Amino acid sequence: MNKPSNTFEIAIEPSFDFLSPEYAELFDRSAATAFQHPVWLHSLYTRLAPETGATALVVIVRDRDTGTLAMVLPLLRIRRGPIRTIEFADLRVSDYLAPVLQPGRVFTIAR
């Protein structure tokens, strides 16, 4: 088993696949809620977001040595009146307000 490093690569992946095996594995290892479930986020990005004019802004953090997914931060770009905002991917229909990550990794990633 590969030990995760303390070095990460951060990228924006607007077309991130929430139904992918790697996200399912991260979700299973995390303390995520039902509103962070692969099916929920897939539906939010493919069905709800387009209806509101929102576009995906998904921040991905990977372990540099192994390429393993360490964190996913689902965000949306959306216009609220005259202002363009970046918001958590909740569209005001869920209680989702946190990144999806493996417990214990937050302190390593935040350094």
Image (cartoon, rainbow, N blue to C red):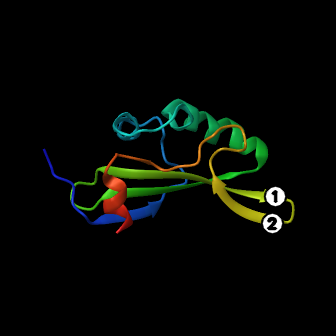
Write the residue at 51% across / 35% down.
Answer: 33
Give above or below for 28 relative to 55: above
Q: Residues within 10 Å of mark 1 (few under 14, many from 20)?
A: few
Which residue has dot 1 on it? 80
| Quarter of the view holding residue 20 | top left
Side (left or right) of 109 relative to 83:
left
- Residue 81 location (% of width, % of height): 86, 60
Q: Residue at x 34, y 52 (%)?
A: 70
Identify the secondary structure beneath mark 1: strand
Residue furthest to the bottom: 111
Q: Quadrant of the N terminus?
A: top left
Q: Amino acid at mark 1?
A: Arg
- Name of the residue lying farthest toward the right: 81
Q: Are marks 1 and 2 in contact (CB under 8 Å)?
A: yes
| Picture residue at 62% right of the left edge, 42% below the top | 45
Q: What is the C-alpha distance between the residues marked 1 and 2?
A: 5 Å
* Neighbours of disc 2 within 10 Å: few (<14), some (14-19), many (20+): few
Q: Which mark is on residue 83?
A: 2
Relative placement, left or right, of 69 versus 6 is right
> Does 89 appear above or below 109?
above
What residue type is disc 2 on? Ile
| Quadrant where the C terminus is found in the figure | bottom left
Q: Residue furthest left?
A: 1
